[in-house]
Image (cartoon, rainbow, N blue to C red):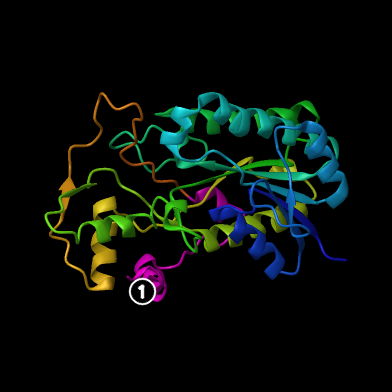
Amino acid sequence: MAKTALITGATGLLGRQVLKGFNGAGWDAKGTGFTRASPPTILKLDLGFEADVAATLEQVKPQVVVHCAANRFPDKCDSDPAGTIALNVEASATLARLCAASSTLLIYISTDYVFPGTEGDAPYEATSAPKPPNLYGETKWEGEKAVLAEYEKAGKGGLGVVLRVPVLYGEANTPAESAVNVLIDAVWKAQEKGASVKMDHWAIRYPTNTEDVGRVVKDVATKYLSTDDKTSLPKILQFSSEDKMTKYEICEIFAEIMGLPLDGMVANTEGNDPNASVQRPYDCHLSTKALKDIGVPVATQDFKGWWRREARAYRK
């Protein structure tokens, strides 16, 4: 009998690839969405309603739930703090409580932004102390703690797992879905007459492909479900590419691939504006040691190679 999985946020940038990864490996996987739901594969679910969440879990009876749904854009988090806390923390705690009650494995997708990213600190281990630099990071860290606490309260420690990932790129419905993909729009804007597009050349990013994350999530689920003593496995895992670049350097790669000049873009090395409402870290590089220690492969696609294949979709 096929193993069963439920992916929240399955209409989003990451959720789509996680769902595809499970189904491609022979699982019976379903997703949840809200405005973009398309039953029977993507079930409509408002994660803010506990009774609806419970009904969906009863309907699907998953062995693993992967919680991808989140408010994940730092600027949007700051403009709607109540909504961000409701989804990133409160809904995560409710989902964890319901999953723990039925002894269902829950993989909570978190972020490298739980760390301050202070110069000289990275790489961060899974056991490093979080100190989020902004509301987005704070709510994801609170979500991590809430999920793990619900499993401990239920006496099901080992079935609640956190997986932290960095900035993501990959197959997208629109460039704006990804903080990486959207930079192609900036490269095109730099082609306009008299353009002077300022682009960050200070913070270091490790753009990671959503397809790779999907594979790792499926491998983690398989490992944890097949391990009798789940308390022997880590509760927090981290996955990241080793491709290291600033946003400006990403734009340079895009321009090179598409044969475009970048004279209309200015490298901004100033770092954070102390008066900006959202402070961003300098370097939050995640160590993948905990994944390697449990035998999960952490290889990733080559950033430039992936974009050479995919850039034709972004040409004008």
- In front of the other: 226 or 211: 211
Total number of numbered discs in the rendering = 1
Identified at 43% across, 52% down, the residue is 176
* Amino acid type of the residue tagged 1 in the rendering: Arg
- Residue sitting nearer the eye, 174 or 63: 174
Quadrant where the image shows the N terminus: bottom right
Tell me which segment is drawn in magenta: 288-316
Quick check: is 81 in the magenta stretch? no
Residue 31 appears left or right of 236: right
Residue 311 occupies which quadrant of the picture? bottom left
Q: Could you tell me which quadrant the C terminus lies in?
A: bottom left
Pointer 1: residues within 10 angstroms few (<14), some, or many (20+)?
Answer: some
Q: Residue at x 23, y 61 (%)?
A: 252
Q: Residue at x 75, y 50 (%)?
A: 64
Q: Where residue 213 sits in the image (x, y, percent)?
A: 55, 57
Residue identifier under label 1: 308
Q: Position of residue 88 (x, y in %)?
A: 59, 33
- Determine if residue 122 is in view: yes
- Please say whether residue 129 is visible from this viewpoint: no
In this picture, residue 32 sits left or right of residue 100: left
In the image, taking residue 214 as reference, residue 311 lies left or right, namely left
| Residue 73 sits above or below residue 17 on the image | above
**Residue 136's spot in the image, x, y percent?**
47, 32
Instruction: Provide residue 224's location: percent of width, then percent of height.
Output: 72, 51
Q: Label 1's element?
A: helix
**As drawn, is 285 to the left or to the right of 81?**
left
Q: Is residue 305 magenta?
A: yes
